[in-house]
């Protein structure tokens, strides 16, 4: 409605000006034309065009919103998604901080039970207590050690998931790899192996590692975990190994994976200069749910 009224006013103003201009140009002074006929017509048309151009520019200026150079409008969906991601990662970090405090308490308890076990064992060798007392202390110590190991495993799993989450955008910006392709940056090592990988193949990787280094492969996440659920990652056909890719063990594992054609993404770190979260993700990249 407002636009219609504005257009009507513009038309009336234009018509009035045309009439006045023509009257002036056709006016006479002392019985002669102010301008010759042809010149009057040219001036009339020029003045009219200038006026219409000015009116058009003014209307366009009023109708177009003001925007700063280089600015773009962020859609509500994009803004909400960014805020949602920040909230999720903040909650996970808060949960991790609580788990770290719990680990410290469990470590203290484990140390106390270890000292108690040593004390009872000495008393048993002296013939002062029964063997059953030593066994009780040993059982309590074993349970405490399980709690500590579980805390450490959970913290490692969370650190690795946070690393993948925070480096997701960097990973998406990288060009895709052809089958058998390999690329390396300061933070990521990628290999797009052509082997048909599944979690059922994890055993041969574990066997290689045990035979090479004489200890179990430090798997932190085998398939989907609660942390991956919260971050929205589909990790069902992947496993994370708690090895820094630049370590001797990490380099040996990566060489084995490339020879076997098994795809992987190795994360050096989430924060430059820090090893927290560094690991080897075996399998295809975890897509978003």
Image (cartoon, rainbow, N blue to C red):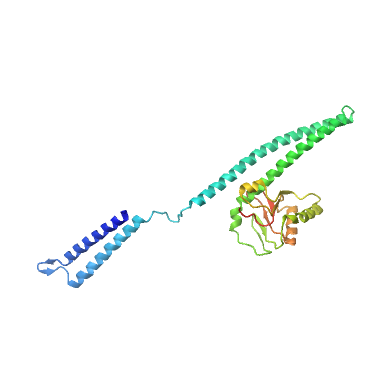
* Residue depicted at x 54% and y 49%: 82
User: Is residue 159 depicted above or below 131 in this figure?
Assistant: below
Q: Quadrant of the N terminus?
A: bottom left
In this rendered view, identify the residue nearer to me: 126 or 79: 79
Q: Residue furthest front?
A: 1
Q: Viewer-proximal residue, 244 or 235? A: 235
**Image point 48% across, 50% down: which residue?**
76
Task: Where is residue 196? Give x, y as percent.
Answer: 71, 61
The answer to whether one can see residue 273 in this image is no
Question: Could you tell me which residue is drawn at 35 percent across and 56 percent down?
Answer: 63
As drawn, is 85 to the left or to the right of 203? left
Count up the numbered dots: 0
Q: Is 121 situated left or right of 190 in this image?
A: right
Q: Residue furthest bottom?
A: 38
Q: Residue at x 73, y 39 (%)?
A: 148
Is residue 254 in sight in this rendering?
yes
Q: Quadrant of residue 90?
A: top right
Residue 271 position, x and y percent, is 62, 49
Figure check: 27 above or below 211: below
Q: Tell me residue 129's x, y (percent).
A: 87, 28
- Where residue 203 sits in the image (x, y, percent)? 77, 54
Front position in the image: 44 or 129 = 129
């Amino acid at each position: 409605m407002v636009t219609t009224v504005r257009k009507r006013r513009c038309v009336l103003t234009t018509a009035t000006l045309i009439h006045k201009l023509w009257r002036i140009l056709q006016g006479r002074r002392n019985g002669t034309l102010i301008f010759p006929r042809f010149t009057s017509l040219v001036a009339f048309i020029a003045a009219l065009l200038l006026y219409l151009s000015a009116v058009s520019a003014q209307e366009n200026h009023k109708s177009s919103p003001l925007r700063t150079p280089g600015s773009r409008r962020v859609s509500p969906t994009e803004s909400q998604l960014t805020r949602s991601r920040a909230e999720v990662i903040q909650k996970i970090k808060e949960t991790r901080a609580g788990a770290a405090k719990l680990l410290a308490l469990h470590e203290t308890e484990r140390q106390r039970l270890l000292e108690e076990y040593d004390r009872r064992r000495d008393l048993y060798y002296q013939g002062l207590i029964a063997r059953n007392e030593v066994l009780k202390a040993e059982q309590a110590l074993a349970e405490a050690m399980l709690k500590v190991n579980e805390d450490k495993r959970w913290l490692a799993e969370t650190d690795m998931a946070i690393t993948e989450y925070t480096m997701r955008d960097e990973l998406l910006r990288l060009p895709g790899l052809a089958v058998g392709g390999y690329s390396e940056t300061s933070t990521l090592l990628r290999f797009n192996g052509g082997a048909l990988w599944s979690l059922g193949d994890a055993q041969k990787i574990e066997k290689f590692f045990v035979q090479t280094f004489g200890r179990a492969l430090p798997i932190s996440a085998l398939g989907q975990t609660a942390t991956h659920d919260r971050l929205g990652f589909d990790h069902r056909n992947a496993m994370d190994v708690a090895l820094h890719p630049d370590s001797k063990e990490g380099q040996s594992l990566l060489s084995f994976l490339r020879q076997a054609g098994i795809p992987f993404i190795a994360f050096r770190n989430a924060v430059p200069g820090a090893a927290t979260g560094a690991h080897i993700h075996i399998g295809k990249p975890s897509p978003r749910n």
